Image: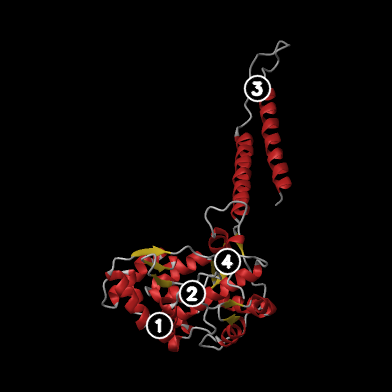
Amino acid sequence: MSCRVWRDLLQRGLCQIVMLDMSWMLWMQPIGASCNTPDVIDGQRPWHGRGLAIVFLIALVVLATAMLTVKALGLRSVEAHAEPFELPPDDFDWGWWNLALGRWVRAGGVDYDAVRRDEGDLRRFVATLGAAGPRSTPARFGTEPERLAYYINAYNALVLFAVVDNWPIRTVHDVRGWLDPRAGFGFFYGLRFPLDGDSTNLYELENEVIRGFVDARIHAAINCASKSCPSLMPHAFEAASLDEQLDMVTRGFCSSAEHVRVDEEAREIQLSAIFDWYRSDFEEHARRLGRPATILDFILAFATPELASALEEARGDDFALVFRAYDWDLNQI
């Protein structure tokens, strides 16, 4: 509703209370004050009328506050408004998504003009993700790799859909309400998407679902449409080759100067902020690999031999560990 409508409703509620108060005072005046009848009140008007008006006003205030809060924070549902793709009876078909990524993804970023040209089919794919998934159609996802591949692909698809649905933007931080509790709130928390028979936002999908698989390699597989994100892979993640694909993207992430570098002059090991944000994930993964539970030991397990040697030497020389500022500009080419 518009602010004018809410204002009119609140005024109407206040008027009702005032009118009830006036009628109550008139009702309570002594009967027969100017004649010979006894100064007796036969009965009293019940309080339920006034109480209902107060409840009505309180409900309006609460509802108006909630509506304004939703608007102020930029909270909204993003619907696909499209028919889902037809799926095979017992599987999930990643064919369209695989081909689409091949058209959209280039070295260094994403061709969002190409994504927008395919927006109709992207909406159909998002509708398909909304209708089928590990929880809503479990028979299609009998193994853990099938479930994890689904959620990684879904995250990447919803990010691209969110960018297109809010186009034009220069950064995901442009998606926001009147208030911005923290940078990125509108994009990662505020937008809710259909997924797996329910709805979710990107924060919940990453932190409550994908991270639940306890595999730090996922941080190299999901892409947040920003320049400092790990590169978006130009093809779908598939259950049959998921382990090899996760190793591949993690090696690329840990070997890229954009995310891991040794600065001899500054005597620093400079890392992506992702390693700081999800430190516990990387440390736990390093421990499960039989290494010391540190960020550097996770990186050493995947970095190229040349970079691994440089990191070992820098660590031995007590180089400072520094996390680089994140570039949230759109990863557009």
Task: Report crowding for label 3: few under 14, some 14 to 19, many 20 or more residues within 10 A (C-alpha).
Answer: few
Q: Nearer the viewer, residue 196 or 146?
A: 146
Report if residue 113 is visible in the image: yes
Q: Secondary structure at mark 4?
A: loop
**Residue 23 horizontal/vertical position (percent):** 69, 28
Which of pointers 2 and 1 lies earlier in the amino acid sequence? 2
User: Does label 4 or label 1 sit earlier along the sequence?
Assistant: 1
Q: Amino acid at mark 1?
A: Asp
Q: Amino acid at mark 2?
A: Pro
Gap between marks 4 and 1, in whole Å? Answer: 27 Å
Q: CA distance from mark 4 to mark 3?
A: 69 Å
Residue under pointer 3: 28
Residue 243, placed above or below residue 55: below
> How has the structure been colored for display?
secondary structure
Image quadrant for the C terminus? bottom right
Residue displayed at 49% across by 69% down: 205
Q: Nearer the viewer, mark 4 or mark 3?
A: 4
Tell me which numbered mark, 2 or 4, is placed earlier along the sequence: 2
Question: Which residue is labeled 2 in the image?
Answer: 230
Residue receiving disc 1: 247
The image quadrant that residue 83 belongs to is: bottom right
* Image quadrant in which you'd find residue 14: top right
Q: Is any atom of residue 143 visible in this view?
A: no
Q: Secondary structure at mark 2?
A: loop
Q: Please name the residue that numbered disc 4 is placed on.
A: 329
CA separation in Å, label 3 and label 2: 75 Å
